[in-house]
Image: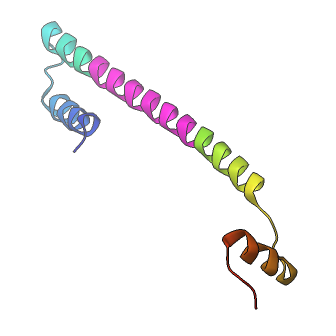
Amino acid sequence: MSDVDQSKAAIEQQRSNLNRQSKASVNAFNASVNRYNALVDGAKSRQINFNSAIDAYNVEVNSHNNDCVKKYYASDLPDAKKLAGITIE
């Protein structure tokens, strides 16, 4: 279970037991909600950064694949064998 999930579960537990007549209890609950929101914001930020890194990687892969694409024909085989040092008989 992630920190975000644990924090959410704790807040749900606190909410059900919250003494709404106690200012200290309400303040403590609100502080927990603020910590949860900060965790969620951090997780979203990390996800955005991760997705950006994936997008940049995919751009590089696509560029590489486009640069390396070559169609080969049967007539290319003798030249390829020569380059590989295979004698054609």
Question: Where is residue 87, by image quadrant?
Answer: bottom right
Tell me the quarter of the image containing the N terminus.
Answer: top left
- Left or right: where 61 falls relative to 28: right
For the point 83% across and 76% down, which residue is it? 76
Residue 46 spot, x, y in % from top left: 43, 31
Residue 17 spot, x, y in % from top left: 12, 29
Main SS of residues in magenta: helix
For the point 15% across and 14% down, which residue is it? 21
Tell me the quarter of the image containing the C terminus.
Answer: bottom right
Q: Residue furthest top?
A: 23
- Left or right: where 73 falls relative to 40: right
51 in magenta: yes
Looking at this view, is 4 or 12 the one in front? 4
Question: Where is residue 16, by image quadrant?
Answer: top left
Residue 23 spot, x, y in % from top left: 17, 8
- Snapshot colouring: rainbow
Residue 69 spot, x, y in % from top left: 77, 61
Residue 47 lies, with reference to residue 30, above or below; the image says below
Looking at this view, is 24 or 41 the one in front? 41
Report the span colored magenta. Answer: 33-54
Residue 23 lies, with reference to residue 8, above or below; the image says above
Looking at this view, is 89 or 24 the one in front? 89
